Image (cartoon, helix red, strand yellow):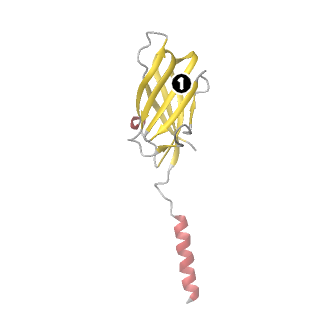
């Protein structure tokens, strides 16, 4: 009788380890793109992600984001609540269209790029460049 009880206990233990949680979160690379042609010395925008299921990795100024290393820019990032603010300054200019940054997002599934609402809040251009349009160009699973 004790052997049977032990076998059932081991079986239930192995069964619990073999169950895969389908809602387990993963990390995704969210890529931000300046879509407007023109040259900008500075660019700042807010990203509302209340429609995305998850959060950016890190909080405040410790959010996991990087500026495009091929651009000569100084980037600053700040994540508060469900708004991520990104700001860039360049002495040589940011010429669009170009990917400006990427950030790590954690969620149970890949969010749609449309779940991120990007609003340009400030910029300085060489003139005639117009209001910069920034969007999420892609969301890619980080292996």
Total numbered circles: 1
Q: Residue at x 47, y 25 (%)?
A: 44
Q: Which residue is mark 1?
A: 88
Query: Front-most of 125 and 2?
Result: 125
Residue 102: quadrant of the picture: top right
Whether residue 68 is situated above or below residue 92 in the rendered picture: below
Whether residue 19 is situated above or below residue 31 in the rendered picture: below
| Residue lying at the far bottom of the rendered structure | 1
Q: Residue at x 55, y 66 (%)?
A: 17
Query: Front-most of 118 and 61?
Result: 61
Residue 10: quadrant of the picture: bottom right
| Residue lying at the far top of the rendered structure | 127
Residue 82 position, x and y percent, is: 43, 40
Q: Residue at x 61, y 21 (%)?
A: 72
Whether residue 53 is situated above or below residue 40 in the rendered picture: below
Residue 132 position, x and y percent, is: 43, 20
Whether residue 22 is situated above or below residue 37 in the rendered picture: below
In the picture, which quadrant includes the N terminus?
A: bottom right
Residue 68 position, x and y percent, is: 58, 27
In the picture, which quadrant includes the C terminus?
A: top right
Q: Residues within 10 Å of mark 1 (few under 14, many from 20)?
A: many
- Could you tell me which secondary element the residue under label 1 belongs to? strand
């Amino acid at each position: 009788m004790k052997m049977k009880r032990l076998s059932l206990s081991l079986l239930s233990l192995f069964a619990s380890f073999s169950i895969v949680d389908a809602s387990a979160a993963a990390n995704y690379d969210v890529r931000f793109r300046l879509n407007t042609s023109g040259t900008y010395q500075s660019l700042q925008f807010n990203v509302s992600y209340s429609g995305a299921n998850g959060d950016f990795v890190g909080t405040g100024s410790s959010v996991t984001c990087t500026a495009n290393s091929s651009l000569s820019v100084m980037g600053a990032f700040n994540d508060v609540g469900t708004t991520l603010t990104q700001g860039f300054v360049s002495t040589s200019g940011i010429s669009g269209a170009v990917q400006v940054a990427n950030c790590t997002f954690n969620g149970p599934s890949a969010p749609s790029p449309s779940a991120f609402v990007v609003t340009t809040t400030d910029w300085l251009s060489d003139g005639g460049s117009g209001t910069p349009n920034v969007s999420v160009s892609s969301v890619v699973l980080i292996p």
